[in-house]
Amino acid sequence: MDISLQQVSYAYAKDTPFEKRALYDVDLLIPSGSYQAIIGHTGSGKSTVLQHLNALLKPTEGVIRIGSTEVVAAKKNKKLREIRQKVGIVFQFPEHQLFDETVLKDIMFGPMNFGVPEEEARQRAIELVRLLGLPEEVMEKSPFDLSGGQMRRVAIAGVLAMNPEVLVLDEPTAGLDPRGRKEIMELFYRLHQEKGLTTVLVTHSMEDAARYADRIAIMHNGQCVLQGIPQEIFSDEDRLMDYRLEVPQSIKFQKKLEEMMGKKLSTLCLTEET
Ligand code: ADP
């Protein structure tokens, strides 16, 4: 399922004294099966774009197409429920949204709310607990008795339990230690590779974008100022500097290596993150 934004502008609290323009004429295409990173500094408009991807926000101007569904300001949309099932969002600190008595019930809540039979919802939850590397005994525990990293995995399982076609991740590793960050990012990458899950990563980490994404969009002051494949985006150091962004260390390292060897390397050589 492709998602496209065409000339999308958005203003918070429109037509009030508090009106705040957050997006200006954003064009963005996220093709089905891609791994799209959206990069930018705080306040550049990333979260506002993200909330348009499953129609939590509707554009003030412009059009969003989510699969075959068109979302525009003026029209009521009967397919919102379907869109929310197909496009799952893992918000920042998703563990804050945990609420149920047990991990199992918490993961099953979303699918059952969407009419999935109890047994199937249970099966999905059990598989996801395994997939996310959580010990089986957490299933009957209160999510609030788990460690921070485990709570985050449970919250992610709750989004995956809806079987989304598109997974949107808003700074999914915020607050985790380096090892936890790497584990979660590798897990999302595996899901993308093995299940063909379209993945949208909102991040300020150029390294994560370089390591995982096959498409990159750069937001700056509410505009999408650059988009393309990583090689293109990272080859223009001066342009990145205009937006106060730096070429990731791993790309610099690869360039140096290529210069020394006198030939291009076909795959990205990545230094281990510390
Ligand atoms: P980012 O995710 O890149 O940090 P945001 O999309 O959150 O950026 O914010 C873009 C702009 O919109 C910022 O100027 C921010 O202050 C403003 N903004 C974000 N949320 C709201 C809101 N709920 N009400 C008013 N302005 C907002």
Image (tube, rainbow, N blue to C red):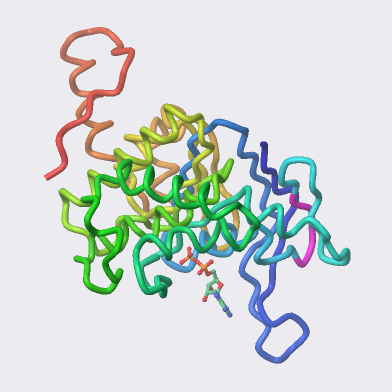
Query: How far across and down, in percent of the image, does residue 227 sit?
Result: 55, 39
Question: Observer-nearest residue: 150 or 16?
Answer: 150
Q: Is residue 246 left or right of residue 70?
A: left
The quarter in which the N terminus is drawn is top right
Q: Is residue 67 left or right of residue 120?
A: right
Q: Is residue 252 above or below residue 16?
A: above
> Range of the magenta residues?
60-64
Task: Name the outermost residue toward the front.
Answer: 119
Q: Is residue 63 above or below residue 94?
A: above
The quarter in which the C terminus is drawn is top left
The residue located at (19%, 23%) in the rendering is 256
Task: Name the outermost residue toward the bottom.
Answer: 17
Q: Magenta segment: does it hold 63?
A: yes
Q: Magenta segment: does it hold 94?
A: no
Query: How far across and down, in percent of the image, does residue 122 sit?
Result: 45, 52
Picture quarter containing residue 210? top left
Question: From where the camera sits, is residue 28 visible?
Answer: yes
